[in-house]
Image: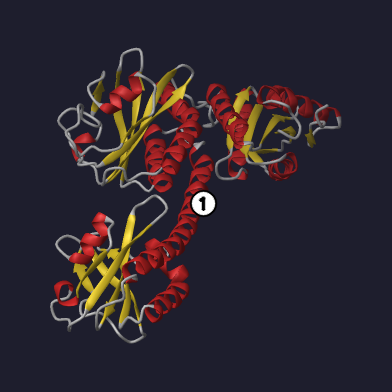
Amino acid sequence: MNGEATGLGRVADELNSWLEALRIALAAERASLWMRANQGTELSAVLCRPEGSEPPETEVLLQGHALGWVVSEGVSLKASRREIFRQAPEGWVVAAPLSDRSGERLGCVALEFAGVPRRDAARAVELGGSVASRLLSGAQATDEATRDLAKYEALYGTIQDLDRKLDLEELAAGICRRARSVSGARAALVASWEHARRRGSVISMDGDLPRSLAKAKLEGDSSYLGLALINATILPRDDLTVRPKFPLYVEGVDSGAGSAIIVPMIMGPDPIGALAVEYGRPREYREGDLERLKALALFVAPAFRNALEFGEVRALSVTDALTGLPNRRATERGLALTAVVAERTGGAFAVAMADVDRFKQLNDRYGHEAGDVVLQTVARLIREGLRPGDIAGRWGGEEFLMVLPGANAEDAARVIDRIRRRIGQASIAWEGRSISVTISAGVTAFPERIRNAAAAVASADAALYRAKRSGRNAVAVSDLRG
């Protein structure tokens, strides 16, 4: 464990002062602070007083050395200096362990004496060690809180990054990456699940996992992953190094995990999939990691369900054949997903309904083929005018629905009005003639103008009607909710 990991850097000045005061009070020749290093297999002298001095050895093995015994057993020591440091001069060493708030031992403090130390030296070093432990624990808590904050920021960033993805593999890969970032796990895996058939498959992995897990099939309760899915329950595994009753993921594949967390993604009564993370050592995860993974599974479950459904109906086509935009069914799903995320997270979204002005007259004058070209051009200009992550779909006939996640009514009205102006300035070529068209649009927003997501389309449609009545070629914003 290095100085940065234990918070040593934050309190180095205080520890130096404490170490020197302890040395002077006990008339010691030298005082040193030792911390775990190299993943806990060694002890390293990180501070030494008086300044410029250092113990006969500055790195020792945790196992097989007297100071390592102090740390691993959590007991004090008084022994000949030569028994502890082979090349040391005559004298004595008194050492005491340092622990954090949870009782995990971080290292030890050692005082070297040229002669025999006074009787209460061991007790004094123990008391001094408790002071250093409190200093280190406080700094460690600050560092952990900072790391936790970064993990929560990554968690909530997930909502914006993943909630609009409809490709299942792309979504699952993003969930894996975010699961690792919010939990500090070494690897993550996402699986889908058919609850009625009690079977599923691995969709994506991230980190150092066996290749044989890719696309692996899950069958019933033959693994901890399967058990978590069948029972729709979170399944933490603290220690997988003791011979487990079941494999972690699938039969015949061992990832070498020391501990793991499996969290089902649930929509309605049943799981539709799960995310799992694993750690290299037993009991490596913390309670905060578990809570963040539960929140992540809650947030991404609607997106995961939509991606599953999107894949199922892709063969039936979710794209409008004429305009290339999502058809009404796919647009409804995109709206529903955006609404679920906004309602669960306290976020916002805007909806706009647009309609080509006097489209029937255009069809009567130029013909339906010309009308098709107009709709294709309008669809292209709408798509080009929206922001990355916004949704636009053909709602029906000459109507288009747009969903703008994270936008309020004012922001959305500006975006839609810019699109309206571009369409009005466009010249659509048709059989040697130029066709000009305009659109009208209505905008609404959740939660400032509608109370619930179900009212979004009706509210936007009502605003569109007002834009039409005002003379067309306009954008109207819905009235504030009562």
42 or 414: which is nearer to us? 42
Q: Is residue 256 left or right of residue 31?
A: left
Relative vertical location of residue 152 with respect to residue 111 in this rendering, above or below: above
Pick whichever, 178 or 16, lies toward us.
16
Q: Determine the image quadrant of residue 417.
A: top right
* Residue 333 in the image, given as x and y percentages of width and height: 54, 25
Q: Where is residue 244 shown, x and y percent of the image? A: 20, 31
The N terminus sits in image quarter: bottom left
Tell which of 65 and 37 is nearer to you: 65
Which image quarter: residue 6? Answer: bottom left
Of the 4 image quadrants, the one containing the C terminus is: top right
Query: Is 124 placed left or right of 141 in the picture?
Result: left
Q: Give residue 316's quadrant in the image.
A: top left
Q: Does residue 431 appear anywhere in the picture?
A: no
User: How far from the left and from the top, in percent, is residue 475?
Assistant: 77, 37
From this view, report whether residue 179 is shown above or below residue 166: below
Does 125 sit above or below residue 391?
A: below
In the picture, measured across the screen, residue 332 lies left or right of residue 154, that is right
Q: Which residue is mark 1?
A: 149
Could you tell me residue 287's position as x and y percent? 42, 41
Outermost residue toward the front in this view: 119
Type of amino acid at the residue the image marks with label 1: Leu
Classify 10 Å Cα crowding around label 1: few (below 14), some (14-19), many (20 and above).
few
Q: Residue at 20% of width from left, 30% of height from top?
A: 247
* Up-down relation of residue 62 to residue 445 (above or below): below
- Seen in the image, is 434 located left or right of residue 251? right
Identified at 25% across, 63% down, the residue is 38
Q: Secondary structure at mark 1?
A: helix
